[in-house]
Amino acid sequence: MIIRKNQAALNADEKRAFVRAVLEVKRTGTYDRLVTTHNNFVMNDTDTTDRVAHRSPSFLPWHRRFLLEFEAALRQAEPSVTLPYWDWTADRTPASSLWGPDFLGGTGRARDGQVTDGPFSFAGGRFPINVRVDGRGYLRRTLGAEVAALPTRAEVDSVLAMPVYDTAPWNSASNGFRNHMEGWRGVNLHNRVHVWVGGQMTSGASPNDPVFWLHHAFIDKLWAEWQALHPGSPYLPTAGTANVVDLHDTMRPWNDVTPADMLDHRRFYAFDTDPEAAGR
């Protein structure tokens, strides 16, 4: 069984294996292909023909499928690797081990945001930014500069308590769990983390920063927690909704994946806090 772990619990060997896998996925071109996919599917509320990845009920299942594709590429490079998650309610500062030079590297330098340490720095020569939204070919971060604090566990719990998955008008104005988790209303969870990291994380090409995957793995975990808290609350909408991915509609760019296919994470992996992971 694939077990996704809290990144804070990874030992030195596990961190090195993860870094090696990311760099290999980058070398093969798969990494940049995934960045391009995400950038192409960052839609705003006026893009009514194809709101799939963001500002839409399919935000959570779309990203679950997206992460599975990345994790499969990691495991092809390093079979022992699984995608870790970053619990930003606990690891809340630029001093957290997540940002160490042995893992993701730290914040960027003041004059241009360039990350200068760690395996993904431009100076290391193995992680150029090729899918560019600003013309710059290096990883950038401004940890904590654009927004002061990451979301707290109390704020997360307030969103997890919401009993309805999503509501009309099924976009960034909706007043349901999905939109509050995505961060267009309320305490601003997912979106705030992107802005706290800064750099490429504030753009459609946000997967350029390897922390994207760890952040979304935690969003994915929180969706699983919400499902466990509200087992009778389904994915919505279920059918017949214009310009929205209903429960059994296919999600682009995949031709054979629907939200219904993505509802149970245990088909693919367990989190280290799941009962299935006990003793492993």
Image (tube, rainbow, N blue to C red):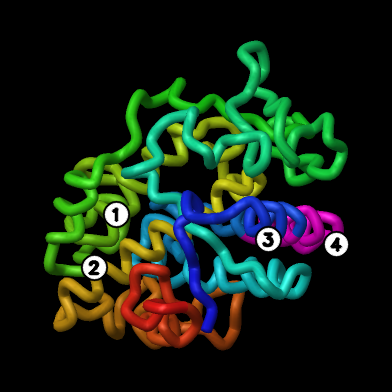
Q: Which amino acid does label 4 sit on?
A: Thr
Magenta span contains residue 241? no
Examine the residues drawn in magenta and state their main secondary structure.
helix
Vertical order, 140 against 50 (above or below): above
Nearest to viewer (mark 3 / mark 4): 4
Along the polypeptide, which appears first: circle 2 or circle 3? Answer: 3
Quarter location, residue 181:
bottom left
Magenta span contains residue 32? yes
Q: Which amino acid does label 1 sit on?
A: Met
Of residues 74 and 223, the one drawn nearer to the viewer in this rendering: 74
* Residue to which mark 3 is pinned: 34
Q: Cα distance, mark 4 to mark 1? A: 33 Å
Which residue lies at the image location 45% right of the left edge and 50% below the top edge?
86
Q: What is the number of the mark on residue 3?
A: none
Q: Do the numbered discs 3 and 4 sit on residues whose CB atoms are within 8 Å?
A: no
Along the polypeptide, which appears first: circle 3 or circle 4? Answer: 4
Q: What stretch is highlighted in magenta?
A: 21-37
Along the polypeptide, which appears first: circle 4 or circle 1? Answer: 4
Residue 230 appears at what percent x and percent y? 16, 75
Q: Which amino acid does label 3 sit on?
A: Leu
Instruction: Give the residue at the far top of this rendering.
Output: 111
Look at the numbered disc 2 and give the secondary structure of its residue: helix
* Residue to which mark 1 is pinned: 181
